[in-house]
Image: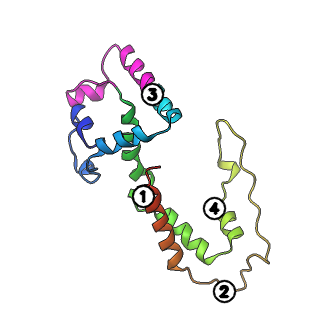
Amino acid sequence: MEGSRARRDGVRRTPELKARVCIACDAVVDVAYAQMPPTQKLQLDRYRDGVNAGLADLRARPWEYFLLGSKPQPWQSQDSLLLIATMYPDLNSDSRNKRELHIAQMRSALPGPLVDFLLSPDPDWEAPLGSELSHMPVLPATDVFDLRRPVAAASSAGVADAAAAHVRWATAGQ
């Protein structure tokens, strides 16, 4: 969390934080929050209220705050958006989108049903909280993909299209 909220909470800039500098993060999340549909704002506001209720019920401040020499401040709805922005690089290979680019390469070189099979979730490894398990993936027939025939080289056009689509999505603020 780089920005005034981090400074307010006493977070010091480590080399790891410096690598994730978000210019004007607070302003960006304020605008994003203002543009959210009311139902999404309500979800964030309810989460905020729950966090603040939990903070109010604490007998002592959490040990991390003792260590930093600061006190927990009330959670704001926008703090959730800052947290997502902070976690995004961790969950997406430092924002390089390698997985998505590799999927684009697969889609440019392999038949769709084969790519769908290779990327399908394995129900043996799932533990859904509120839904059913995925269906067991079906191996494509040899008329879809035959290992005895050579595979076309991956096209960089598919990768470039995927990268451009990601940039469009990221800058659209959705």
Q: Earlier in the sequence, mark 4 or mark 1?
A: 1
The CA span between labels 2 and 1 is 31 Å
Q: Is residue 52 placed above or below 173 in the rendered structure? A: above
Q: Is residue 83 magenta?
A: no
Number of other residues with Cα within 10 Å of mark 1, as a class: few under 14, some 14 to 19, many 20 or more:
few
Left or right: residue 146 compared with residue 162? right
Q: Which mark is residue 16?
A: none
Q: Nearer the viewer, residue 103 or 30?
A: 30
Q: Which residues are magenta?
A: 47-74
Amino acid on which disc 4 is placed: Leu
Q: Nearer the viewer, mark 2 or mark 3?
A: 3
Q: Earlier in the sequence, mark 4 or mark 3?
A: 3
Q: Is residue 83 placed above or below 42 in the rendered structure? A: below
Residue 1 in view, yes or no = no
Q: Earlier in the sequence, mark 2 or mark 3?
A: 3
Task: Please name the residue that numbered disc 4 is placed on.
Answer: 119
Number of other residues with Cα within 10 Å of mark 2, as a class: few under 14, some 14 to 19, many 20 or more:
few
